[in-house]
Amino acid sequence: MESRRPVRGTAAGGVATVCFPVEEGSSVVGLLEVELSDPMSARESRLVEGVLRILRNQTALLDYGERDTLTGLLNRKVFESRFAKICGDLPQVISSESQPHSWLGLLDIDHFKSINDTYGHVIGDEALLLISQIMQRTLRGADSLFRFGGEEFVVVLEETNTPGADIAFERIRTAIQNHRFPQLGRVTASLGYTTIHRQDLPAICVERADAALYFVKRNGRNGVRCFERLMESGLIKVKDKSGDVELF
């Protein structure tokens, strides 16, 4: 993986093996291990490498329409197309806080306009890229991360109970706060999140998370709040059936 070149070896029992790096963009995302009764010839090795190049090019074409060009994260269009599947996999009823289900978090970088105005868009883009990498390292492999544009990101946690969601979203906020960004030093983020329901539409679910996010930003930023708990405490209430919310 470090050399990005095929590595030959011998497995138990004397079987010849060749490991090929599988690349996606500028990263190595996997290994292809080939076992043979006889050592692989140079022609066969070139053939495998050619097939892997075709695979890399095909993946790049698919990613072009699905991923944000700056961060490499999935984009808003993909989120909306995948949301129905996320809802379809949910239980009909969530009976307790210990029952695993899915959550949607909306994260916004605090004072991002000030970062761009003070340091320029190059530094702002670097901050966006670093924050996306921090979040990817913090999340589990089963979780999903999307860039919605600007300084907004959507996080989807699957198969997580209420205490687990609290921990996961707070871990993201803490990881961003503790990172030291070149030239910027400390950067913080605000995050609001909500339970995903089986009957949800993408816009309605994002609206709930956005209401919790807005509450955080109105109350000091650099925090994490749950929409449902804000509702229970009376800090947010639904004004009418359209889903509009009012903050106190």
Image: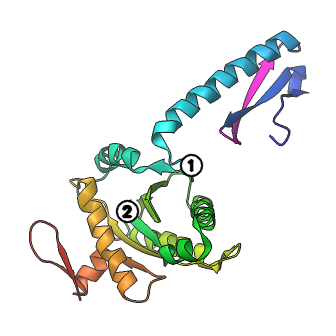
Name the residue that disc number 1 marks: 72
Magenta highlight on residue 234: no
Give me the residue at 58% from left, 58% from top. Answer: 136
Q: Quadrant location of residue 234?
A: bottom left
Q: Assign the N terminus to one quadrant of the image.
A: top right
Find numbered disc 2 in the image and state the secondary structure of the residue it sits on.
strand
In screen coordinates, is 11 left or right of 176? right
* Side of 217 where 198 appears, left or right: left
Q: CA distance from mark 2 to mark 1?
A: 22 Å
At horizontal 57% and vertical 26% (from top left) the residue drawn is: 58
Q: Which mark is residue 171?
A: none
Helix, strand or loop: magenta stretch:
strand
Residue depicted at 70% across the width and 42% down the height? 26
- Name the colouring of the figure: rainbow
x, y percentage for residue 240?
9, 72
Residue 75 can be seen in this image: yes
| Circle 1 SS class | loop
Q: Residues within 10 Å of mark 1 (few under 14, many from 20)?
A: some
Please indicate, yes or no, whether residue 95 appears anywhere in the rendered image: no
Tell me which amino acid carries mark 2: Trp
